[in-house]
Image: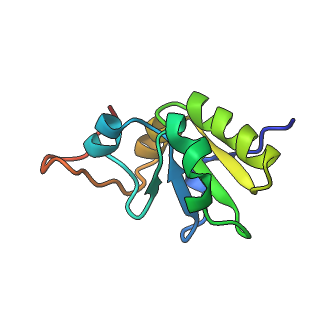
Amino acid sequence: MTLHEIAAQAVPENAHLLDVRELDEWRAGHVPDAQHIPLMELQNRVGEVPQGQPVYVICRVGGRSAQATVWLNHVGWEAVNIEGGMQSWAAAGKPMISETGHPPYVA
């Protein structure tokens, strides 16, 4: 199976983002409008992920999102891994929000 990857700065503006990190990581800082499904819940909740459009998958550094991307592509989705995850996203100066009331950061 092939892993399709893209740099954070190359993610299209209106892309559907799927964040597969744990809840505490998500709360600390995430992409606005991203969908949150932790990796361990993805198989049970895959029906919540839209089909018919590319899904850009992100985690902290790219490992969990790579696993999710390979699996999603295997079961019929069009998934693309974001290289370097949220660390690369933040380093590229892309928008982030927090659920904690504090400035967002990558946990």
Q: How many marks?
A: 0
- Residue 87 percent location from the top left of the image: 44, 35
Report x, y in % for residue 51. 70, 66
Q: Is residue 1 above or below residue 100?
A: above
Image position, residue 84 (x, y; %): 56, 34
Q: Residue 34 placed where, x, y %?
A: 45, 58
- Outermost residue, front direction? 44
Front-lying residue, 35 or 97: 35
Residue located farthest toward the left when viewing the structure as drawn: 101
Given residues 57 and 95, the one toward you in this image is 57
Task: Tell me if residue 94 comes above or below residue 59 in the rendering.
Answer: below
Res 28 → quadrant: top left
Viewer-side residue, 94 vs 24: 24
Q: Quadrant of the C terminus?
A: top left
The colour scheme is: rainbow
Q: Quadrant of residue 3?
A: top right
Please tell me which residue is depicted at 81% across the width and 44% down the height of the picture.
74
In-image side of 103 versus 64 (left or right): left
Q: Would residue 49 be found to the left or right of residue 23 on screen?
A: right
Q: Quadrant of the N terminus?
A: top right
Residue drawn at 69 percent across, 49 percent down: 80
Q: Quadrant of residue 48?
A: bottom right
